[in-house]
């Protein structure tokens, strides 16, 4: 069965989309117009009741959440060595990075434009938006100092953590944060942009 991948432009789905292209997966990409709330349509909710992207339809069912999709692809295409599948500790370290990007960095950024998820009061939403840039700076200070180990996120080898960092790093400018204040992250971003899979996928996300 051909994989079917649902994504929204400029969303966290970019990370999984890059990996799908990188490994040469046989897949169909289905773009949802998030501004028009296609992710809330009955047709899509039948696929992913969370009403979020990404979602990956496989022959065994639907996978949601970026860390889960990335690990699935790493395991499904082991020849690309996108995760240390034979080393339990190293794999756990990789998962700690991808899960932190999902649970902390992504949420920090979401407070900039989606404060309505946490508060109905306009003043509370405005306060969250005002705080979001500093939260992103704090996150990327940590990435710059501690998490980005080498030319790639985990060191010498390209892994599923790299397209994820590239994705969340791409949100900095929209939050009013100059990526140049994080030289190693900026260098990583440029290195990612040189990959054929990235060059192929970016236009599909309006980037």
Image: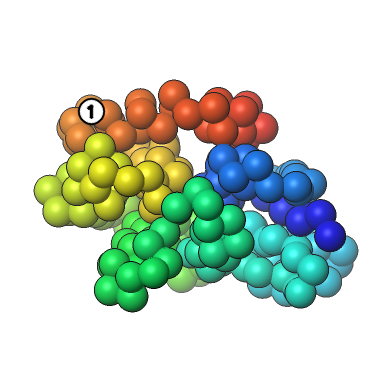
In the rendering, at what x and y percent does residue 124 appear? 38, 64
201 left or right, relative to 151: right
Q: Is residue 68 visible?
A: yes
Foreground residue, 138 or 37?
Answer: 138
Residue 17 x/y as whole percent: 61, 45
Whether residue 96 is situated above or below residue 3 in the rendered picture: below
Q: Is residue 206 above or below residue 98?
A: above
What secondary structure is found at the residue carrying circle 1? Answer: helix
Identify the residue under disc 1.
180
Left of 81 or right of it: where is 48? Answer: right
Vertical placement of residue 3 versus 28, above or below: below
Residue 96 makes an appearance in the image: no
Residue at image x 19%, y 48%? Answer: 149
Q: In the depicted view, which residue is nearer to us: 9 or 85?
A: 85
In the displayed structure, does residue 110 sit left or right of residue 204? left
Scheme of image coloration = rainbow
Q: Nearer the viewer, residue 167 or 73?
A: 73
| Quarter of the image that includes the C terminus | top right
**Quarter residue 54 falls in:** bottom right
Q: Quadrant of residue 48?
A: bottom right
Image point (41%, 32%), residue name: 192
Looking at the image, the residue that sits furthest to the right is 43
Badge 1 local density, few (<14 within 10 Å), some, or many (20+)? Answer: few
Quarter-wise, where is residue 172 in the image? top left
Name the residue: 66% across, 32% down: 204
- Residue 98, percent across and down? 38, 61
Report the number of numbered marks.
1
Q: Quadrant of the N terminus?
A: bottom right
In the image, what residue occupies the spot 45% across and 52% down? 81
Where is residue 146 shown, x and y percent of the image?
14, 53
């Amino acid at each position: 069965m051909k994989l079917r991948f649902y994504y929204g432009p400029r969303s966290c789905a970019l990370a999984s989309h890059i990996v799908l292209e990188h490994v040469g997966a046989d897949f169909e990409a289905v773009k949802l117009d998030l501004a028009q709330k296609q992710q809330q349509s009955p047709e899509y909710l039948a696929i992913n009741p969370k009403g979020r992207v990404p979602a990956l339809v496989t022959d065994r069912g639907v996978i949601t959440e970026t860390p889960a999709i990335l690990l699935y692809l790493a395991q499904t295409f082991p020849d690309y060595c996108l995760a240390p599948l034979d080393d339990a500790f190293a794999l756990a370290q990789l998962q700690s990075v991808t899960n932190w990007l999902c649970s902390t960095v992504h949420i920090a950024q979401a407070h900039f434009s989606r404060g309505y998820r946490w508060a109905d009061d306009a003043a509370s939403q405005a306060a969250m938006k005002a705080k979001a840039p500093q939260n992103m700076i704090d996150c990327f200070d940590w990435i710059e100092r501690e998490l980005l180990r080498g030319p790639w996120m985990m060191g010498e080898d390209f892994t599923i953590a790299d397209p994820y960092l590239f994705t969340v790093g791409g949100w900095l400018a929209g939050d009013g944060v100059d990526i140049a204040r994080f030289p190693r992250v900026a260098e990583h971003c440029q290195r990612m942009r040189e990959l054929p899979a990235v060059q192929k996928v970016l236009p599909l996300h309006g980037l």
